[in-house]
Amino acid sequence: MLKKRIIPCLDIKNSRTVKGCNFVDLIDAGDPIELAKKYSEDGADELVFLDISATLEERKTFIPLVEQIAKVIQIPFTVGGGISHVEQIQALLHAGADKVSLNSSILKNPELIREASELFGAQCIVAAIDAKKDGNIWKVYSHGGTQETEKELLSWAKEIEEKGAGEILLTSINADGTKQGFDIEMLQALEKNIHIPFIASGGAGSTEHFSELFQKTQATGALAASIFHFQEIPIQELKASLLEKNIAIRR
């Protein structure tokens, strides 16, 4: 059985870490290099870096910042934002990323998943999905959650798996930044349709939310931002709480 992972997320805009609610109302959350170093030292299992404005601004992810972060951490590191070609993936992996997260680009060109997985290995390719509930279904959004697409979550997740992605990072736009808990309903629907690991994102606000996630879904990782950035829940305190509930986590 895969041990559960605790994953801080650095949403980056203008070289600063930011955090908002429902993908809007962004506020400054600190220096990404300092935060990354702290999370690595505090026992985070992995780190995710998302250049959230790269796609909107039609530019590449900041390579120098990726290189700087890679130098100060000792944990696996996933990078996303503005990645649309295998050459960019190669550059990011060379800069120190262990995995890349693809979102808007694969909605436009799903074959990028297969091409990237074949070149670099499925373990390097994380397919990110931002989804929002619309009636009885979840619509998929692109460009940092700003543009609704024609895709529906469950069919899109299945397509992603079939094309060779090694993992899915699913963010609930409805839950993002609310601190009201992970979107359990959406995650339970997802796990019935795929067989690859998935990370849950959006809604973490307490240690109970993490234990509920791991007890009620098959998520292999829990991603959160503001509760870690603003030191509301220390990572070691969270892990101790999960261990008390007999949840298999990395110490």
Image (spheres, rainbow, N blue to C red):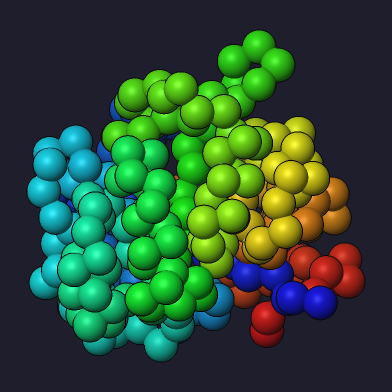
Judge from the rendering whether residue 11 lies leftward or rightward of residue 137; answer left or right: left
Indicate whether 126 appears above or below 128: below
Residue 167 placed where, x, y %? 56, 62
Residue found farthest to the top: 135
Query: Residue 5: where, in percent of width, then height?
Result: 63, 70
The quadrant the C terminus occupies is: bottom right
Pick whichever, 164 or 22, lies toward us: 164
Taking the image as shown, residue 75 lies to the left or right of residue 155, namely left
Quarter holding the N terminus? bottom right
Q: Is residue 176 visible?
A: no
Residue 115 visible to the viewer: yes
Residue 144 vertical placement versus 192 (above, below): above
Residue 237 position by quadrant:
bottom right
Residue name at image x 19 percent, y 46 percent: 54
Q: Residue at x 50, y 28 (%)?
A: 151
The image position of residue 58, as x and y in percent, is 12, 41
Query: Which x, y percent locates residue 12?
Result: 25, 52
Q: Which is more toward the observer, 108 or 33? A: 108
